[in-house]
Structures are given as structure tokens and as C-alpha cells.
Image (cartoon, helix red, strand yellow):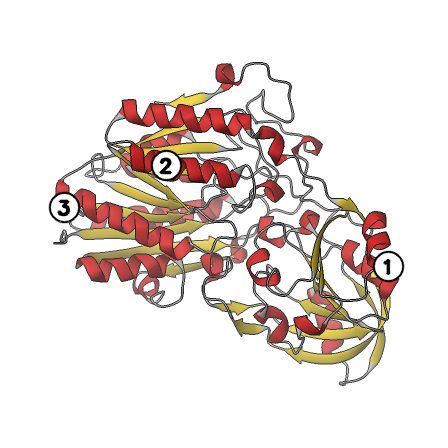
């Protein structure tokens, strides 16, 4: 038996790095309206997961607006207001709906609005007829969940995997819970806790501690606690400066008492595991010494400081400089540099030129590298994910557009130049441009965790390299102005229970 219903559908998705000098732009966001949302069916995204579930449950979907942009700097207020005005208009224009289903990120910040998702949920509750309408929202595992989000949603359902191979599955899980609640006439609520912990993005992989144990505990509590539907573990996003940045837990339940017990256990376990989140990235000198003793590959040189998936510009030169020490060995790196692509586009195939590459997007970088390169190929930069569960599918679906691209060679180093920042989460990125990753001795990867599903399948070894960049792994290097203190590891804390925030 399924519950018939009319479901208002919308999406607003961005992970905002508030410490970046360069703000996001309105043009960085793609906006789909009305029936365009339904065109997501089959693209492997969370929206696709919801639409499949809606078909199964016999729901009437009322599509509104989906606005999404790649991770980047602070978002213009116009992006949020454009979304809200369209969503508000659609919400008021339709006949009463049985529920609202939102696909959000949870770490979006805009000019004048540091908690975008909480603000949108609060505004929705203020619309006539929506005071008691069930509101279910899907959130990224890196959400900075806030009390405002918990207050105004009936359910917050978080991804459980990093890399985010379960984004679509999470949307299906949220829809299944919504269907159950509609069938049974249940109105759950969200209960929330934020322990005084903030994690480096490199410490948020779900195959590693502390996330591995915390997620296991969350599943155990769900199974053992009557009235608890979902226990969510949010790793948080440390590159966002707002009061609630950091790790949090949210329990969707019928009983506040049961939820509070779960939250207390999760917070206690998180604090006990706090030292497991300490991250050490090897210096360029340390990596260089190791690589001089290594003949076989591929050796994956991971550059968390220029993590495109966390908003970095993707044009850092740190890994390229390291590869230049081994320039006669077959290697590859992707650099986002539209100006370099435009220069190469004017050359004949096989032509040589001296080209300044990268180093313009962040004040932390050492600046462009001038290299003598040979033009290998040009393309429109479009490719289809080899892995439909790629972390990238949660952001863009299956079909990816890197913008105009060029491949150039400097001695043994292949450099893929892109025009659109594209996280390296799928091997199809290289193969689509004629670069076979398994044939290389070393590959530079601008990521922290989400590349692992793709690159761990081919890696002989993998190293996290400490290069200059805006996505440093240690939260102590950032000048937080809004973050609620104290918080580990920035501050010294004797009794974490005194500084744990609960809602309600």
C-alpha cells in the first residue's frame, strides 16, 4: 500500500567556502524550472532518486525550482532571493500539497544570510497553509546543520557515505520515510545536537575514524530505539564561518526522550574519538624523497589544499611543481585555467609554445609556472561519468561539462587544462581527453576524500601532500569570526558537555 499525495519539489544546492577571496557569481548557478526538474529522471542524482520513488508511490509531483552551483565563495544574495521568489510563488499558487520535499546541501552561505537552508525552511513555515505541512529535506554529509533547520523540518536525511556514493540512495530513503509517515499519519520531528568539534575535510571519510564508528553507532541506535526513524551524522564543513560550523547529529523521531538519548550517546562517542581526526599531510620535500625510491605506479598525489570539491579554484601549482622534479616520468595533472586553454586553442596540433599555467586563483599559491609545452589536443570538455555512483553525480548528474579543454605536454607530464572547475571524482575525466590513468607513474588529484572511489581502484600508492592553498587541513589556520567557541581542536575544553548545543 502506498500513500497518494501531491508533493512540492525543489532543490537548492551549494557548499560555500566563506574564506575564499573570490565570491561566487550569479552565473555560476544553473537554474531549472517546472518540468525541467522532471528531466532529471535517469541522471543518477538525488533528484532522480526522488522521482523514481514518486513513480513507485503514485505521487503527483509539483516541480518548482532547482538552483545549484559548484562549491565556491560566498554566494550572492540574488541567488537565494531568485530561488525563494520562484519557490514562494509556486508554493502559493498550487492547491494544498501533502508534503514538501527539498534537496539541499546544508552548508550554503550567502551575503547577509549565513544559514541559507535554515532561512528557506523558516520562510516556508511562514507561508499560509504551510505551517503544518510535512517538510522533508535531504542534506549532504558535510552539512553544517543548525537549530533553525531542525526547528522547521519534519525530517533531515543525511548522506551516509563519503565519497558520496549514496546521494541518490539517500533521496530514495527520505522518500520512503515520507511515504511511511503519510500512510500512517505520523508527524516526526528533528532533534539536534552539536558537540564542540570541528573536523578537517580530510578527516571526514566514512571508511576512517571518527566517521566510521559514529555511523556504525547511528545505525545501532536506529535499530535499538523505538520511535527513531533516522540518526544522521553530519561531518560539517570547516571552511564555512558560521556559529554552528562543525560536526552535528540530527535524529528524526516520534519521541523527544528517545531522540535525546541517542544524541547524548553520539556526542559522547564523538568526543571520545576526537584525537582520531588529527590529520598529517606530508610536505613536498617528504613526498619527493619517497618518490625518488619508487619506480612503479600509479602514485596518486592528493592535494587537499586545492580541493575543487570544497570550493578551491583548482589552479594551484603545488603538485605541478612537485611533478617537475620527475618531469621525464609519465604523469598527469588537471589545472583549471581558461586563459591557458584559450591560448592553446590558437595553436596547431603538435605546436610548441611557452605558457604560463595556473597560480592565479588563490593568494596562497606561488603564482603561474611558465613551461614550454606541446599542444596535444583540444575538446569541448564534455564527458559521461564512468561510475554512475560517483561523488560527482550528487552535484551534476551523469553528464559533466568541463568547458573547453586542452591537453598539453611538458616532457613526460600531461597537463589537462579546463575552463570549468571540475572535481576529480571520476576516471572518465582523464580518459575522455585521451589520458589513460593506469599507464601513468604519478597523477595529481585536487581533492581530499571524494576522489578515492575512483582513484583507489588504480593506485599503487596514495599520498596526501601539504601544498599551499585555500583548503588547508588544519582548522586552526582560519580566522573564524562567527564560529561558536570553544571548539576542538581550536580551543582547550575540559568538559565538552558544558558546550554541547541541543535542540529542542
Helix, strand or loop at disc 3? Answer: helix
Which percent across, then down, holds residue 443? 72, 63
Residue tagged 2 = 220
Packing grade of label 1 (10 A; few <14, some 14-19, many >=20) is: few
Q: Is residue 273 visible?
A: yes
The residues tagged by marks 3 and 2 sit, at their Cα atoms, a distance apart of 25 Å
Q: CA distance from mark 2 to mark 1?
A: 46 Å
Q: Residues within 10 Å of mark 3 (few under 14, many from 20)?
A: some
Q: Nearer the viewer, residue 348 or 26?
A: 348
Quadrant of the frame with the C terminus: top left
Question: What's the distance in space between the residues labelled 1 and 3, CA to CA?
Answer: 63 Å
Sequence order check: which comes first, mark 3 or mark 2? 3
Question: Relative to 204, does residue 494 appear above or below in the rendering?
Answer: above
What mark, if any, has residue 183 been given in the picture? 3
Question: In the rendering, at what x and y percent does residue 232 appear?
Answer: 40, 38
| Residue at the image point whose x is 86% and y is 64% from the top | 326
Residue at 78% from the left image edge and 71% from the top image edge: 330
Amino acid at each position: 500500500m502506498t500513500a497518494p499525495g501531491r508533493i512540492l519539489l525543489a532543490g537548492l544546492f551549494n557548499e560555500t567556502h566563506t574564506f575564499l577571496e573570490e565570491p561566487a557569481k550569479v552565473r555560476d548557478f544553473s537554474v531549472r524550472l517546472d518540468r525541467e526538474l522532471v528531466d532529471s529522471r535517469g541522471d543518477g542524482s538525488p533528484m532522480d532518486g526522488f522521482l523514481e520513488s514518486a513513480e513507485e508511490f503514485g505521487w503527483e509531483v509539483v516541480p518548482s525550482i532547482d538552483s545549484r552551483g559548484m562549491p565556491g565563495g560566498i554566494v550572492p544574495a540574488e541567488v537565494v532571493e531568485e530561488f525563494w521568489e520562484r519557490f514562494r510563488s509556486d508554493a502559493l499558487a498550487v492547491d494544498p500539497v501533502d508534503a514538501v520535499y527539498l534537496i539541499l546541501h546544508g552548508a550554503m552561505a550567502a551575503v547577509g544570510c549565513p544559514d541559507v537552508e535554515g532561512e528557506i525552511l523558516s520562510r516556508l513555515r511562514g507561508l499560509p497553509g504551510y505551517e503544518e505541512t510535512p517538510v522533508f529535506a535531504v542534506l549532504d554529509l558535510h552539512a553544517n546543520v543548525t537549530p533553525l533547520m531542525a526547528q522547521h523540518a519534519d525530517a533531515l536525511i543525511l548522506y551516509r557515505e563519503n565519497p558520496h556514493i549514496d546521494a541518490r540512495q539517500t533521496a530514495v530513503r527520505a522518500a520512503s520515510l515520507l511515504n511511511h509517515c503519510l500512510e500512517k499519519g505520523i508527524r516526526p520531528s528533528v532533534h539536534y545536537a552539536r558537540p564542540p568539534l570541528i573536523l578537517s575535510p580530510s578527516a571526514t571519510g566514512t571508511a576512517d575514524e571518527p566517521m566510521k564508528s559514529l555511523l556504525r553507532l547511528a545505525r545501532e541506535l536506529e535499530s535499538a530505539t523505538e520511535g527513531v526513524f533516522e540518526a544522521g551524522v553530519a561531518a560539517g564543513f570547516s571552511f564555512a564561518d558560521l556559529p554552528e560550523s562543525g560536526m552535528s547529529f540530527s535524529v528524526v523521531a516520534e519521541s523527544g526522550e528517545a531522540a535525546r538519548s541517542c544524541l547524548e550517546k553520539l556526542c559522547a562517542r564523538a568526543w571520545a574519538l576526537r584525537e582520531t581526526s588529527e590529520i598529517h599531510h606530508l610536505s613536498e620535500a617528504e613526498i619527493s624523497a619517497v618518490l625518488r625510491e619508487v619506480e612503479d605506479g600509479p602514485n596518486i598525489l592528493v592535494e587537499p589544499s586545492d580541493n575543487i570539491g570544497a570550493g578551491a579554484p583548482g589552479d594551484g601549482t603545488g603538485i605541478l611543481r612537485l611533478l617537475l622534479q620527475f618531469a621525464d616520468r609519465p604523469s598527469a595533472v588537471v589545472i583549471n585555467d581558461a586563459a591557458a586553454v584559450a591560448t592553446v586553442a590558437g595553436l596547431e596540433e603538435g605546436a610548441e609554445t611557452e605558457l604560463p599555467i595556473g597560480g592565479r586563483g588563490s593568494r596562497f599559491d606561488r603564482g603561474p609556472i611558465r613551461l614550454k609545452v606541446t599542444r596535444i589536443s583540444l575538446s569541448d570538455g564534455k564527458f559521461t561519468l564512468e561510475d554512475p555512483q560517483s561523488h560527482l553525480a550528487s552535484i551534476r548528474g551523469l553528464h559533466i561539462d568541463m568547458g573547453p579543454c586542452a591537453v598539453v605536454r611538458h616532457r613526460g607530464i600531461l597537463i589537462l587544462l579546463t575552463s570549468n572547475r571540475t572535481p576529480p571524482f571520476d576516471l572518465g575525466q582523464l580518459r575522455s581527453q585521451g589520458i589513460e590513468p593506469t599507464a601513468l607513474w604519478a597523477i595529481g588529484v585536487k581533492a581530499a576524500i571524494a576522489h578515492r572511489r575512483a582513484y583507489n581502484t588504480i593506485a599503487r600508492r596514495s599520498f596526501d601532500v601539504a601544498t599551499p592553498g585555500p583548503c588547508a587541513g588544519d582548522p586552526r589556520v582560519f580566522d573564524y569570526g562567527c564560529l561558536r567557541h570553544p571548539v576542538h581542536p581550536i580551543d582547550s575544553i575540559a568538559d565538552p558537555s558544558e558546550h554541547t548545543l541541543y535542540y529542542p
